[in-house]
Image (spheres, rainbow, N blue to C red):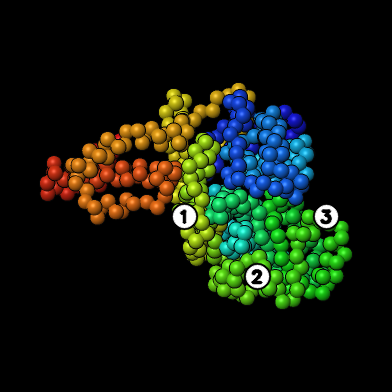
Amino acid sequence: MPSAGTWDGPATHRRNSSRSRGMGSIAACGPARLVRRYPAPCVRDDWGKMPDEQDDLVYQLRDSLMMRNAYDPEEHDFALLLRFLRAREYDVDRATRMMMDMLQWRQENRVDHILDEFHFAEREEFLSIFPQGYHKTDKQGHPVYVQHLGNINLTRILEVTTEERMLKYHIQEYERCLKYIFPVCSKVWGKQIDATFAIVDVKGVGFYHMTKEVRSVLARLTKVDSDNYPETLYHTCIINAPTTFRAIWAIVKPMLNKRTQGKIEVCPRDFLPSLRKWINDEDIPEYLGGKSKGTLIDDVGPWRSPELVKEVEVERLALMEGDASARSLRRDEWTPTRQSSTLSSATVFEDAEDRVIDDIADEDGNAAVGPVDPPAVSEPALSAGGTPRRAASLAARIRSLEAGLPEHVSRLREVMKVDEKEQLKYLSSAPPRSLIGRVEVLEEGMELLLTAQERSWEMENPGQPRCSLCACCSIM
């Protein structure tokens, strides 16, 4: 466990960003921007705190982490700090210790790289033995996680994978949820979504299921969850509970605090009416009595939309730079899609999304575009006071490109005589001044430049075949 003032920061390379820098440099640059992505209801939360009180305590936690060179504005957003505060009943010192332990765990286990590096090739076979996964959302926009605990057969599972790989997959799913599923659900519903709705099927669970080995695995998973992903459960519906389970629950329930009791609902034997209170019929899996034909392997939900994933990522970067021009989509503006389940969760979203990769600057301050090789775990962070080597912000670079675009595009349109039909393909549904809308305008400009270059070459070299590898045929 790190001592106060000695934390050297987590591994900072991430697929979504190439701003690898030490945490100490953040403190040197002054307080980092930290805002709510969505406004909070003006009511007291379950801990009796009003939004302005929550804000003040979040800033205190942010400052406490900065003092220890442990605050990373790219990863530690408002919602995450608020969750850790709530997990420790808004005690800033205890929340700081909890986060420091979490950061140490992430560094030791390379959690920042798990979406890139871990490929769970046995995913489908594993899920056929121990079915679990995300399936659409509840009526409030929370992603629904379904787990069939009664199917757990550790002997069969260990024939397919190892305990360590199962744990890595569990962590990877949490990371995917935090980085993609929650943000997309938040955008679709226009409010902060940072908790899941769980359906736990305990059909067939008995004392003979809960062997020492099974209890050990479940305890290990539970500890990872509670220590590193606190306050991410909205509500749990336990279905198909046998008599023995109900007897155990009657004993355990009084030991839990009222808030935890309220999160767990043991449904009657006819559980469908209970589920319908929370989830629409079309979002409940067909095999549970609903109308959704998607399976847990298909991972159906708005987070499967490449366009939404891309837009959320662009807006995340824009928010960090203070550009809050983007809007939120209504629920009726997305269509859930079923996609092939042959890929592991490590690659499914890498293929689905159009990655937005930020630039970093080289020693001379020139922008180097593209992904960066991950540093070794032992690589030391920049010392306090170090200057982060990075190019101008994404929003600033877009503004710079926009400044010179109108004149060039207008001139090209006159020369090329782009007809009305051809212009239709450039129409965008994005708001004109949103960051995604502005990026699409720049993409249109680039396409016009490439088309103009193509036509210019054809006019200068009539009838000649064009070499696709010719160095002079590319815009520099």
First of labels 3, 2 by sequence position: 3
The residue at the point 55 percent across, 24 percent down is 387
Question: Looking at the image, is mark 3 or mark 1 earlier in the sequence?
Answer: 3
Label 1: how many residues lie within 10 Å, few (<14), some (14-19) or many (20+)?
Answer: some
Percent x, y of residue 178: 61, 50
Question: Looking at the image, do the residues carrying marks 1 and 2 touch, with CB atoms under 8 Å apart?
Answer: no
Extreme-front residue of the structure: 42
Residue 67, given in percent of the width and then of the height, sits at 69, 28
Report if residue 1 is visible in the image.
no
Q: Amino acid at mark 3?
A: Asn
Residue type at mark 2 is: Arg
Q: Residue at x 64, y 37 (%)?
A: 10
Circle 2 residues within 10 Å: few <14, some 14–19, many ≥20: some
Q: Nearer the viewer, residue 17 or 405?
A: 405
Q: Is residue 104 left or right of residue 16?
A: right
Badge 3: few (under 14), some or many (20 or more) residues near its Cα, within 10 Å?
few
Horizontal side of 103 relative to 442 (left or right) equals: right
N-term mark: 1 or 2: 2
Q: Which residue is mark 1?
A: 306
Which residue is disc 2 drawn over?
Answer: 276
Q: Residue at x 71, y 43 (%)?
A: 50
Residue at mark 1 to residue at mark 2: CA–CA distance: 29 Å
* Secondary structure beneath label 2: helix
Asked if 475 appears above or below 295 in the picture, the reply is above
The kind of residue on which mark 1 rests is Pro
Q: Is residue 8 left or right of residue 473?
A: right
Instruction: For marks 3 and 2, give the one nearer the viewer.
Output: 2
Q: Position of residue 196 (x, y in %)?
A: 65, 57
Q: CA distance from mark 3 to mark 2?
A: 26 Å
Q: Nearer the viewer, mark 1 or mark 2?
A: 2
What kind of element bears circle 3?
loop
